[in-house]
């Protein structure tokens, strides 16, 4: 596989809050032709706002699958402002990896997912998969859980 790490312009500029979703999607669409050049199947993915971008644009751009790390299901403390519609509309195989104590949406807050979607929980993980010192899981074990889940899912998603 090939991997392209794309840092959103707002992050490069040092901002802490992402711009409007349409602005993020425009930037993602603009770089897609460079990703397609290799001729390999593309798995669109991202973390947090990037996961939302991948979910909103993946099928439209021809991604074979979507990897959503720390999908922000809602603003912390505002579960009534759900972004589940973006997630449920993906339409391609999707792996969601979510921290067990993510304030943007704990795994048990997710709606029932369609068959082509899988949800993996990182116990005790926050929105950045950080772990409290009291967790019975350390960072190497959490990373192994994440990478193992992706490595297991990827061949099935691309089959």
Image (cartoon, helix red, strand yellow):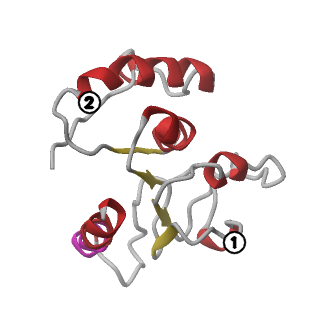
Q: Nearer the viewer, mark 2 or mark 1?
A: 2
Q: Earlier in the sequence, mark 2 or mark 1?
A: 2
Q: Residue at x 61, y 21 (%)?
A: 22
Which residue is disc 2 drawn over? 36
* Residue 25 part of the magenta-drawn span: no
* Residue 142 part of the magenta-drawn span: yes
Is disc 1 placed on a helix, strand or loop? loop
Determine whether 141 is above or below 57 in the image: below
Is disc 2 placed on a helix, strand or loop? helix
Determine whether 23 is above or below 72 in the image: above
Determine whether 35 is above or below 133 in the image: above
- Which percent across, then down, holds residue 93? 46, 60
Q: Which corner quadrant of the image does residue 131 belong to?
A: bottom left
148 vs 78, left or right, is: left
Camera-side residue of 80 and 65: 65
| Mark 2 vs 1: CB contact within 8 A | no
Which residue is disc 1 drawn over? 112
Camera-side residue of 77 and 106: 106
User: Where, quadrant-wise, is the C terminus in this rendering?
Assistant: bottom left
Q: Residue at x 19, y 35 (%)?
A: 39
Q: Which residues are magenta?
A: 140-146
User: Magenta span: helix, strand or loop, mainly?
Assistant: helix
- Which percent across, then down, holds residue 121? 47, 73
Tally of numbered discs: 2
Q: Residue at x 30, y 30 (%)?
A: 6
Q: Residue at x 46, y 72 (%)?
A: 120
Work out how far the residue at label 2 is from the one at label 1, CA to CA, in angstroms. 32 Å
- Which percent across, then down, holds residue 65? 40, 52
Q: Which corner quadrant of the image does residue 113 belong to?
A: bottom right
Residue projecting furthest to the bottom: 136
- Which percent across, then down, holds residue 96? 48, 61
């Amino acid at each position: 596989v090939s991997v392209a790490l794309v840092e959103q312009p707002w992050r490069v500029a040092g901002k802490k809050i992402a711009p409007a979703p349409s602005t993020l999607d425009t930037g993602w669409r603009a770089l897609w032709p460079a990703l397609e050049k290799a001729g390999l199947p593309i798995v669109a993915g991202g973390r947090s706002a990037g996961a939302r971008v991948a979910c909103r644009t993946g099928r439209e751009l021809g991604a074979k699958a979507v990897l959503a790390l720390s999908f922000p299901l809602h603003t912390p403390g505002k579960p009534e402002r759900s972004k589940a519609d973006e997630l449920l509309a993906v339409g391609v195989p999707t792996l969601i990896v979510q921290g067990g104590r993510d304030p943007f949406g704990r795994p048990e807050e997710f709606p029932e997912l369609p068959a082509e979607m899988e949800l993996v929980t990182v116990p005790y993980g926050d929105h950045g998969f950080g772990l409290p010192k009291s967790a019975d899981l350390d960072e190497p074990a959490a990373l192994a859980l994440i990478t193992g889940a992706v490595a297991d899912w990827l061949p099935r998603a691309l089959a």
